[in-house]
Image: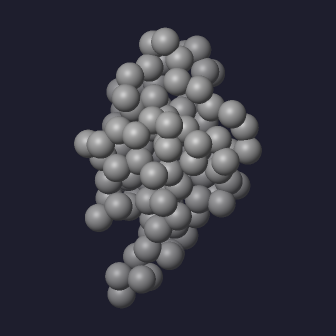
Amino acid sequence: MADALLTSQAVFRSRAIEVGFTEAAVEVAVSEGIASMGSFGFSTPFIPGLYYQKFILKGLSKAFSRPLKVGPGQQEEGPLKELAKSLFNVAPDADLTRAQLTSVRRLYLEAGI
């Protein structure tokens, strides 16, 4: 049963929408190969509450096939914000809404539990 929760695309879509992802954000994730809670949980080496920016940036850069950088306005969650901006199609210099960032944090935490 637990395996089905980690591998099901339907579960991922349902949870993502429930925590605040838009349908378009879900489609971006799926197109990047992140289509289940298991793949979302391992999409970066980010661990909620712990910040290893170099490893996260390296993982995200590889996953999205483009270099990602922590800009001057970004704090420890920079890489997670990069992921959120990519999923929600937010310009690099624009701010995420609190709801967008919260939804990515929550789903990421759920995927890692």
Q: Nearer the viewer, residue 21 or 112?
A: 112
Task: Give the position of the N terminus as an image quadrant.
Answer: bottom left
| Up-down relation of residue 87 to residue 36 (above or below) | above
Q: Residue at position x 43%, y 73% from top?
A: 6
Q: How many marks?
A: 0
Measured as percent of width and height from the top left, residue 59 is found at 57, 48
Examine the rendering and report whether any part of residue 95 can be seen.
yes
Q: What residue sits 45% from the left and 29% below the top?
A: 78
x, y (%) of residue 25? 57, 44
Q: Can you see residue 12?
A: no
Apparent side of residue 98 relative to residue 28 in the rendered image (left or right): left
Q: Residue furthest bottom?
A: 1
Quadrant housing residue 100: top left
- Location of the C terminus (image quadrant): bottom left
Q: Residue at x 59, y 26 (%)?
A: 69
Which quadrant of the figure has residue 68? top right
**Whole-percent x, y for residue 33 in the image:** 65, 60
25 over 12 or under it: above or below: above
Q: How is the image coloured?
A: one colour
Horizontal arrangement in the rendering, residue 90 relative to residue 107 (left or right): right
Say which residue appears at 52% left-offset and 24% top-offset: 70
Which residue occupies the foreground of this view, 20 or 80?
Answer: 80
Is 96 rendered above or below residue 16? above
Residue 20 relative to residue 56: left or right: left
Q: Residue furthest left?
A: 49
